[in-house]
Image (cartoon, grey):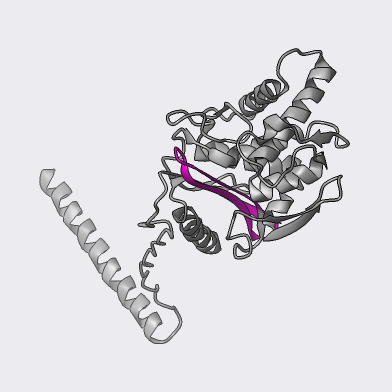
Amino acid sequence: MGKIIQNQSIIAVTVVNVLAIFFAGVFGALIVYGMVKPVPEIKQVPVVTKIDPFNNIALQAQSVYVFDTVTGKVLYSKNGEAQLPLASVTKVMTALVASHAPQNTVVNVEAENLENGAGGLTLGEKWDLKKLLDYTLVISSNSGASAIAGAAGAVFSDENGWTGKSRDIFVGEMNKTAHALGMNQTYYLNPNGLDESTTLAGAYGSAKDMTTLFSYILKNEPSLLSATTEDSLNIDSQNGVSHLAVNTNIMAHSVPGLLASKTGYTDLANGNLVIAFNVGPMHPVIVAVLGSSQEGRFTDVEKLVNASIAKIADGQ
């Protein structure tokens, strides 16, 4: 019985082999005569690795954050959440908080506003709030920021029945706004960002927080920082005095699609610069640089702008 099964197995294997040879021959013949096309060889497509334009970029800044407002992607970060002195980048928050005061608010330049220098203003001069905001942001006027804080703070006091020094009330509103926007590394001690002493800055924040602030302004109050895109402006006070405001951002004319900018420099902060620009139609990217040098902040931002354009153009 065992031999019969063994013989049947041998026969079955032989039949299978014969059939395999037969059909292989038939298939081969069909290929030769063009009746069946051979299965093409599958070639492996090489994977192309895109080089990140931000790789090995040389920067002087201690902290950098580059944010794409359309996609919500962080294009680049270097110590982006480090808490550092803000210097005059502080004035962006000053402008945002002051914009909540009535636009017919008149700002009087008082002696206490000139304690840290004239900043282009004269004692007793009167300004429309919006015009003084533009002037202050463009030339980074410390006296202008102080005068705005005093006038707007007085308005907030009257509206809410608050007591206290108007400038302190205004700074309190700056800190409330920062908290509301989720700017977790940011707090303000004064409205202009000047160092309070040789060891204490006038405001602290992170590069990431500055992109949050600029993003909010671009979305909700896009005209607030429009003056900062100009090389210079002539702005008149209510007294009829014409003031030439030359932008402290020397890159204002060279950044493509510039939407907003603000410089900052003090002994403690060194060089700061934050800008927003369109990398394409309706496609703002924000670049924040903190803790660079007075000149290095501009070269740092230039490199970051070029890298941002290249990265987005390459679909990364």
Number of numbered discs overlaid on the protein picture: 0
Residue 306 sits above or below residue 173 on the image: below
Query: Which region is colored magenta?
Result: 260-288
Whole-percent x, y for residue 83 in the image: 46, 32
Residue 19 visible in the displayed image: yes
Residue 141 sits above or below residue 20 on the image: above
Outermost residue, right direction? 104
Determine which quarter of the picture holds residue 113: top right
Residue in the foreground of this view, choosing between 183 and 25: 183
Residue 288 visible in the displayed image: no
Determine which quarter of the picture holds residue 268: top left
- Assess whether residue 109 is covered by the magenta stretch: no
Q: Residue at x 54, y 31 (%)?
A: 203
Image position of 164 (left or right of 205): right
Q: Residue at x 53, y 37 (%)?
A: 86
Image position of 99 (left or right of 301): right
Whole-percent x, y for residue 56 in the image: 35, 57
Residue in the foreground of this view, choosing between 66 and 273: 273
Outermost residue, bottom direction? 33
Give the overall secondary structure of the magenta segment.
strand
Instruction: Look at the image and tell me in which quarter the N terminus lies.
Output: top left
Whole-percent x, y for residue 5 in the image: 17, 47
Residue in the foreground of this view, choosing between 17 and 250: 250
Q: Residue at x 62, y 28 (%)?
A: 178
Image position of 170 (left or right of 198): right
Q: Residue at x 54, y 49 (%)?
A: 273
Whole-percent x, y for residue 112 in the image: 68, 29
Image position of 311 (left or right of 23): right
Residue 116 sits above or below residue 67 on the image: above
